[in-house]
Image (cartoon, rainbow, N blue to C red):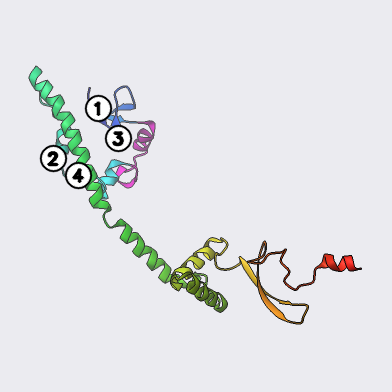
Amino acid sequence: MRVDNCFFCGRPAWPSKGITFMRNDGKSFRFCRSKCHKNFKMKRNPRKLKWTKAYRKNAGKEMTVDSTLQFAARRNVPVRYDRELFAKTLKAMERISEIKARRERIFYKKRMAGKRAREVAAARKLVADNEHLLPRLRGSEKRRLVELAAERGVDVEELEREELAAKASGKKSKAFGGEVKRLRVRTDGGVEEITESFGGVVGEDDDEDDGFEDEDDEMDTD
């Protein structure tokens, strides 16, 4: 059973599948699907369509020069049937497919080598060109980052990158917005600085007598 390749995209056109077009001069064209047949009738160039084998080979994304590709070439030479030759041919076909798959993997790895470095370089260039569009930190935020870096023992630049990334993505900041500093006047006339979170006071027990007046106690005395 011979599997022909699609005349337009290069995919395999299996027997009893696809479309066969016979031209008036007797030449036959095999298509794997109606999509290829329609593009052929519209006289489109397969080298300009990214989903075809011709485009990928022209762009250097497929192997074009390899000894395994020569075995798939059509040979219109009659050969007398030989059982031993037929068995050897079947074994050779399996071996050739394995070699071709391995060489394609090696070709892909070589082609994609350095892709990550190129992407990082392009991203850095984009950031450098559009630096004026990035969010900036206020002076108070920078001082707060310095304090957090001193407490945690980490680098200030790392915290700045995390803060800018959180601002750009619209997420809540880990360094800001989670707590609020307030000044509270005590009953004896003193002033104390406390830290309150969105859920209440941080690090203080509500049941502990801290010298503040309780509203419930005032109501009981009345």
Amino acid type indicated by mark 2 = Ser
In the rendered image, which residue does mark 3 sit on?
11
Task: Tell me where residue 49 appears, x and y as whole percent.
Answer: 34, 45
Is the N terminus in the top left, top right, bottom left or bottom right quadrant? top left
In the rendered image, which residue does mark 2 sit on?
67
Around disc 1, counting alpha carbons within 10 Å, would you say few (fewer than 14), some (14 to 19), or many (20 or more)? few
* Disc 4/disc 2 C-alpha distance (Å): 10 Å
- Which label was assigned to residue 3? 1
Side (left or right) of 101 relative to 210: left
**For residue 47: magenta?**
yes
Amino acid type indicated by mark 3 = Arg
**For residue 16: magenta?**
no
| Mark 4–mark 3 CB contact (< 8 Å) | no
Q: Residue furthest right?
A: 222
| Mark 3–mark 1 CB contact (< 8 Å) | no
Q: Which residue lies furthest to the front in this view?
A: 209
Question: Mark 1 or mark 2: which is in front?
Answer: 2
Amino acid type indicated by mark 4 = Thr
Around disc 2, counting alpha carbons within 10 Å, would you say few (fewer than 14), some (14 to 19), or many (20 or more)? few
Side (left or right) of 178 relative to 5: right
Q: Can residue 115 be seen in this view?
A: yes
* Disc 4/disc 1 C-alpha distance (Å): 20 Å
- Position of 105 relative to 185 (above/below): above
- Position of 191 relative to 83 (above/below): below
Q: Judging from the image, what secondary structure is the residue with disc 3 in?
A: loop
Q: Nearer the viewer, residue 109 or 150?
A: 150
Task: Tell me where residue 167 appears, x and y as whole percent.
Answer: 54, 65
> Considering only order in the chain, which callout, 2 or 1, is on the residue closer to the N terminus?
1
